[in-house]
Amino acid sequence: MTAVRSIPTEQEILGWFESLSNWGRWGADDELGTLNLITPAKRLQAMALVREGLVVSCARTIGYEPAADNALPARHFMLASGEGEAPVDRGRAGSTDAFLLQPHGITMTHLDAPAHSHVRTDPSQPWTLYNGKPAKLVTASQGATVGSTELAGGGIVSRGVLLDIPAVRGVPWLEGSDPVFPDDLDAAEAAQGVRVEPGDVLFVRTGFPRRRAERGPRPQAEGISALQPACLPWLRERDVAVLGADTGNDVMPAQYPAIGLPVHGVGMGAMGLWILDNPDYEELAVTCARLRRWDFLVTIAPLKLANGTGSPVNPLAML
Amino acid sequence: MTAVRSIPTEQEILGWFESLSNWGRWGADDELGTLNLITPAKRLQAMALVREGLVVSCARTIGYEPAADNALPARHFMLASGEGEAPVDRGRAGSTDAFLLQPHGITMTHLDAPAHSHVRTDPSQPWTLYNGKPAKLVTASQGATVGSTELAGGGIVSRGVLLDIPAVRGVPWLEGSDPVFPDDLDAAEAAQGVRVEPGDVLFVRTGFPRRRAERGPRPQAEGISALQPACLPWLRERDVAVLGADTGNDVMPAQYPAIGLPVHGVGMGAMGLWILDNPDYEELAVTCARLRRWDFLVTIAPLKLANGTGSPVNPLAML
Amino acid sequence: MTAVRSIPTEQEILGWFESLSNWGRWGADDELGTLNLITPAKRLQAMALVREGLVVSCARTIGYEPAADNALPARHFMLASGEGEAPVDRGRAGSTDAFLLQPHGITMTHLDAPAHSHVRTDPSQPWTLYNGKPAKLVTASQGATVGSTELAGGGIVSRGVLLDIPAVRGVPWLEGSDPVFPDDLDAAEAAQGVRVEPGDVLFVRTGFPRRRAERGPRPQAEGISALQPACLPWLRERDVAVLGADTGNDVMPAQYPAIGLPVHGVGMGAMGLWILDNPDYEELAVTCARLRRWDFLVTIAPLKLANGTGSPVNPLAML
Amino acid sequence: MTAVRSIPTEQEILGWFESLSNWGRWGADDELGTLNLITPAKRLQAMALVREGLVVSCARTIGYEPAADNALPARHFMLASGEGEAPVDRGRAGSTDAFLLQPHGITMTHLDAPAHSHVRTDPSQPWTLYNGKPAKLVTASQGATVGSTELAGGGIVSRGVLLDIPAVRGVPWLEGSDPVFPDDLDAAEAAQGVRVEPGDVLFVRTGFPRRRAERGPRPQAEGISALQPACLPWLRERDVAVLGADTGNDVMPAQYPAIGLPVHGVGMGAMGLWILDNPDYEELAVTCARLRRWDFLVTIAPLKLANGTGSPVNPLAML
């Protein structure tokens, strides 16, 4: 990993908003972006990867305790419990509950909807979502009247590929804000004997969930590893459909403060790329290593949350 | 459909808590119940059913408006919208939101966790979940410390079968509290040329979502169609893994008020059956009819909600 | 009540935004508006009105059931109940709960903060709060960074006056969208032998809570009685500090759709008037009639909800 | 403060559940407890204490940021903001919001309802609230069907007395879990020239809010100052109506772990005492010192939260 790595300048990244753009590629009104790359044929190819009948969940548990990396945790409220007196004296009684979920952030496994990212490169212009939809249509009172998570409500089913960066680098996990570069992706492909292809769901392991399990929560301010924006041309060239590093998917602290989060910006806003935040690939990485193969069938089934800017999900990998 | 139908008495149903029981079948500590029936071989068999590469979602949209059949709807709160001033002047800004979700009831597509159903047949004994777990361990302060939705967090992947009852009966949907009887299930199997087998996910269409789309919401008090409890021995004999009629899965108004909801009671509590409430099979039924086959791959991926008594889900059928 | 009543035109009301304005009256930076009218001397005068030692609450109960006039009710979640096992075997254990409260609307007794009303009369200009604060500082992510309910967190304590309109008109309550006119206010003053003075908290009874108790909830669409905007000059002339009719304080259906809610608009935005929505004066009206006096001490103590646009309150009248 | 202080044993405190009890004092069905001590005459006496026309709020601000002493903060959700496009082009538009409030704990200023404390001294008996109401009537599904905060919905208005313990001890605040003893209360009375009388609202200042402002939040585990349970006979003898130390009102870490929180237990459960948690007396203490008097009129107006175990409040002191 001693290759000279080109760190893009802010100006370069601003240029990618145009040069890597998929605006218009699937029509002037398209909202699906890179999900267009997942065809029935692609799905059938993905199905053929299931040989053992194994299913591995890639979601983290949703807990309710505040932590350094979870300042505003989900809340769980019981509406009826097993402690009380049942309305009947035999037969069946029941418990019910309610959940307050705030999917975005660096903790809950969730899929970002297009409405989550507003972009612009010219301050004299209004902010837009992917393919030019006005960002102001994502309103405080109505939510995402464009670019909602419902767009993926039909389900995402495709070939998944796991690139295990710490394994290639020979470390248990990537520390702090250590970024993943394109040559990391290339090296993982070479070491694992796999190649990312159009329409794939790309899982990139940094090992953060293992680090958290062993070392405890890490505040966002102490750094988050993710793909360095230098990977954006690589993602565009390979025509990845969904990107999911096992963190918040943008390096923290922000390296390009003037333009916010470049992977979310260029990726979602210009390329129409779908992003999966905060998954957990620890069990999947062990399974892939054991079977010595790193591609599989993936399903991601976001809740059909009307006008939502994202959805908690439980992605499943099948091998 | 003029066959003489045996309507079970309350006493018979109480007997089924024992005679149809799966307690101990998969060990004294088992909590998975009928999910044990889904083996890797079963999953591989299910994968082979995907021939077109089609994916059909079986979830309803989660909206936020109160309705006759949705008195306490989900709530959606925006935490940042596209209307405001972005923290950067170009690059990327974003919207975020929060959701209050109350999965149980007759509206939201959700998977019941074992903790949702407490059963007993002897009033001198404490209430229990499936396989004898004490119901009082589902507490107001901690939630489902047993029988949580996390049990299915690894994902449910199996063969799915849709039995389209209105199609067999020649009606657009089942009205009011019109129940589905075992001979309806048999007739649908015969008409569709399909047979429900051990480990299957059984989808039973009553057509309620179509009725709602055309006629508007229907209050719970006006009646809900579902499997008549007479189907319980059938479900047990066939070793169904997951039951999902496209309603609340127990006929309303309650026909056996002294014992609450028999399908949830005997099914979940005695048989360890998993129940999928309020899915939507309208698109799936059309697709199955077009392809002239009614079995497919199914994935159900509940959120890993710690100590939850259920989870909203978006079940996917793949053909 | 057969006096000729002048119904103001939309154009007149737009003019009142300027002619009735209190902008600048208490300084260029003032946010307190009409609360400036409540001086220590005013409070001492109000204290002297307490002769019986009686306290009457003017708040409605906050319930959790949806109703025709309460589509999105408060929600109540228990976090620990008395049904469970206590952590100690003697001594003390406890119950706790959480509440989801959405104060605005036509149901919950609440005090509007200045941030709740944005006004403008020239579409080429930005929207502002009272005294020219930019409305855009009330943001989706931060809430009311100006004009928050905290402004009244110190408590509102002044003389209260109840004008009982149905009593003067000889009816049990005002029906539908029947408005209150300035001559109603004058007639009530005359009949009751009381006069509204600067700094007063003005309670106007329409009797809606009694109607609701006897006839059930009434949807907003079926009409809400309140002060006709024609009362605005009267309120300004009298220098009322807080206006609280026992409804939503603007006649519904909106009579001036092009300008929204005129009482909230001219009152809050131009005059800096504080508005108390949805109180209940039924017990107070009976008490006043019995004691034959209609002025008293009032306290309104909004919660210090940071950046809130309003607060649920329990106003107390003391006689 | 070198007097020998008698620290009660656990056994003594268990005895106080009986010897200090007010059960039956105001009738077999009474739920109001010490609020019975506040008579119209008492209120009139309290009114006479207002001489300056000053109002001082004793509530803390409700913020939304997690902190060491606020793990599950309130949440604030905007439903409409000033950033968006208004539905009208001139006149009035508006912002609205929602709040998730969890009153109990050591942060939010709130009044405990009787339902918040369940007591028993004989493990063979069921838990009860004050005056023997069954604790199991506080249910997970219905909340406080007895002992609700609605009991005080009519408002608490009485004479308040502030005893400023740090001032008497010559320190800025009480540190850690430093308890307040009966001789502290006596010493403060003597130094301030005031005496606590039946029906009074007793405010006890430890200075925690000042400490927090200067030193930052302090986790519950690091200690909370409050009245040592040794003060319970003093409170009973003086017939205090409401107790409000400016903390959680029981010393932490729990000194009597076998019996939980003794002040809440004996106070609320046996005496029917109402407790005000987490107020802020910093401004009030300065005002009292300046005016050289420590009694005043107090109003506490809990929200009428149906079946609530407590309510956020903004207590007002008037001098």
Image (spheres, coloured by chain):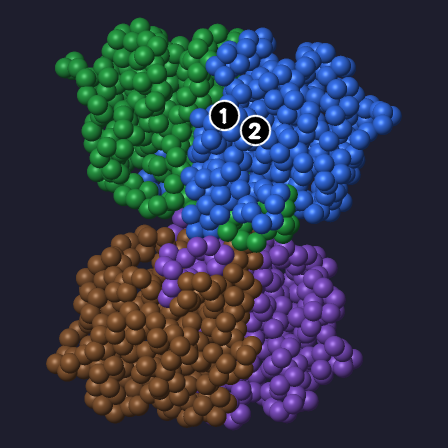
Chain colours: A purple, B brown, C green, D blue
> CB under 8 Å between callouts 1 and 2?
yes
Which quarter of the picture shows residue A38?
bottom left
Chain of the residue displaying label 1: D
Q: Is residue C51 above or below residue B166?
A: above
Q: Position of residue B45 (x, y in %)?
A: 43, 92
Which quarter of the picture shows residue B282?
bottom left
Please indicate, yes or no, whether residue B70 appears anywhere in the rendered image. Answer: yes
Asked if residue D191 lies left or right of residue A198, the reply is: right
Which quadrant would the N terminus of chain C be assigned to in this image?
top left
- SS for tag 2? loop
* Residue positioned 69% across, 37% down in the render: D13
> Local crowd at mark 2 within 10 Å, few (<14), some, or many (≥20)?
many
* Residue positioned 47% across, 51% down in the render: D140
Q: Amino acid at mark 2?
A: Asn
For residue B225, the mark is none
Q: Quote the CA–CA distance across marks 1 and 2.
A: 8 Å
Q: Residue furthest left?
A: B2
* Residue positioned 36% across, 52% down in the render: B72
Q: Residue furthest right?
A: D2
Q: Is residue C43 above or below residue B165?
A: above
Pick the front one: C305 or C109: C109
* Residue positioned 42% across, 32% down in the render: C110
Q: Amino acid at mark 1?
A: Trp
> Local crowd at mark 1 within 10 Å, few (<14), some, or many (≥20)?
some
Please indicate, yes or no, whether residue A30 appears anywhere in the rendered image. Answer: no
Residue beneath disc 1: D26
Pick the front one: C4 or C106: C106
Residue beneath disc 2: D22
